[in-house]
Amino acid sequence: TSCDETAAAITDDGSVVHSSVVASQTDIHARYAGVVPELASRAHVERITPVIREALADARTPWNKIDAVAVGHRPGLIGSLLVGVSAAKALAWSLGVPLIGVDHVHAHLHAASLTQPGDPSPPPSHTDHFPALGLVISGGHTSLYLVDSPTAITRLGATIDDALGEAYDKAAAILGIPFPGGPNLDRLAASDDADDRAADLPVSRLGPDSLDFSFSGLKTSLLYAARGIPSSPTQRLPHPAPPPLTPERVRDLAASFQRAAVRAVIFKIERALDAADAGDLGHNARRLARLIVGGGVASNSRLRRELADLAARRTIALHIPQPRYCIDNAAMIAGLAFHLHADGVIADLSLQAHPSATC
Ligand code: KG4
Ligand code: ZN
């Protein structure tokens, strides 16, 4: 319950998902074109018990088979987090099993390791091939990580302004694309006739060694391309009016935005891989064997295509979740909790909800 998804899952051994239920609140927040925190927490309160019951029923798991209870306790909307943390404490206490607090951004890096019972081609074990480069791209976070194990995660860089998903949602609002903006903009940008060069939008690189991201300039450039550049009072000639915002223009601007946004992400991944090759990420990082991606924007069609190209070009293994495990879900929380528990990371009933990330 970190934002506007109420989710519960039953998992085994850190990767096998027996059930995963996600109750999304898209319908509640659509008329406000964004998540309203107070409405989100109220909806979590109403949904949490039925969602947990459904996860148990789907997995045909009785209460007495539950070995531990995990909860995403940071980062996120505080009112939403509190609902999940309270429910998890009550469950762990009443079942007499350990309680494990999980950082939900770290859990996004675990989502690519999730598999179904009897999956003929399960993803490689999560203990293989470390260290890896991690990328989380969601509505609240855009960060690169050095991943030394499922539980040893060091941040290398992060957005200095908007998260990528947030930039997508704002770009969609500028273009009048309905909520949820990110997936709808992606769909429009991917249409056959879209011209992704209709507007030349900037790709931020920041300083020469920076592994941070910035998307606010891209967002402002899109605003100007859509609505025109505002004239200053001292200006003699006004800026020319932009082309009318027809459905075709909206589609082409969506594609131009998507091209620039994806290029910015690919550029920073390549820069991080170059830094690792040069030994600039520390000695241990020299043999980065794979790239682990997670977060809602990891379901973006163009990004998935370009990540696959990058992985082939750099001969690096790409681990990207199935689309249903890209958005917030409880399977990734329970999966990572297995590894935390193995490391002896167990909480007690004083576990707190925190709106900010650990790293
Ligand atoms: O990981 P997530 O479910 O929640 C957070 O932890 O923030 O990510 C949600 C974000 C939203 O901003 C949404 O617009 C974006 O992911 N998103 C997408 C796509 N699907 C979801 N953005 C671009 N393209 C998509 N296909
Ligand atoms: Zn998330």
Image (cartoon, rainbow, N blue to C red):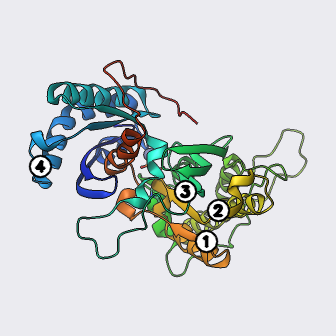
Circle 2: residue type: Leu
Q: Which is more foreground, mark 3 or mark 4?
A: 4
Which disc, if any, is residue 61? 4
Q: Cβ–Cβ below 8 Å for labels 1 and 3?
A: no
Neighbor class of circle 3 (other Cα within 10 Å; few <14, some 14-19, many 20+) is many
Q: Does the residue labelled 1 lie within 8 Å of ligand 1?
A: no
Q: Cβ–Cβ below 8 Å for labels 3 and 4?
A: no
Q: In this view, does 241 lie to the left or right of 169?
A: right
Q: Which of marks 2 and 3 is nearer the N terminus?
A: 3
Q: Which is more foreground, mark 1 or mark 3?
A: 1
Neighbor class of circle 2 (other Cα within 10 Å; few <14, some 14-19, many 20+) is many
The mark total stands at: 4
Q: Cβ–Cβ below 8 Å for labels 2 and 3?
A: no
Q: Which residue lies furthest to the bottom in this view?
A: 192
Name the spot of residue 45 as percent of width and height, x first.
Answer: 23, 30
Question: Looking at the rendering, in which quadrant would you find the C terminus?
Answer: top right
Which disc, if any, is residue 316? 1
Q: Earlier in the sequence, mark 2 or mark 4?
A: 4
Circle 3: residue type: Leu
Circle 1: residue type: Ile
Q: In this view, does 65 lie above or below 185?
A: above
**Callout 4 secondary element:** loop
Taking depth in this image into account, of 229 and 149 the one nearest to the observer is: 149
Q: Mark 2 points at which residue?
A: 288
Q: In this view, does 58 lie to the left or right of 242?
A: left
Q: Mark 3 points at which residue?
A: 175
Q: Distance between the residues labelled 1 and 2?
A: 8 Å
Q: Does the residue labelled 2 lie within 8 Å of ligand 1?
A: no
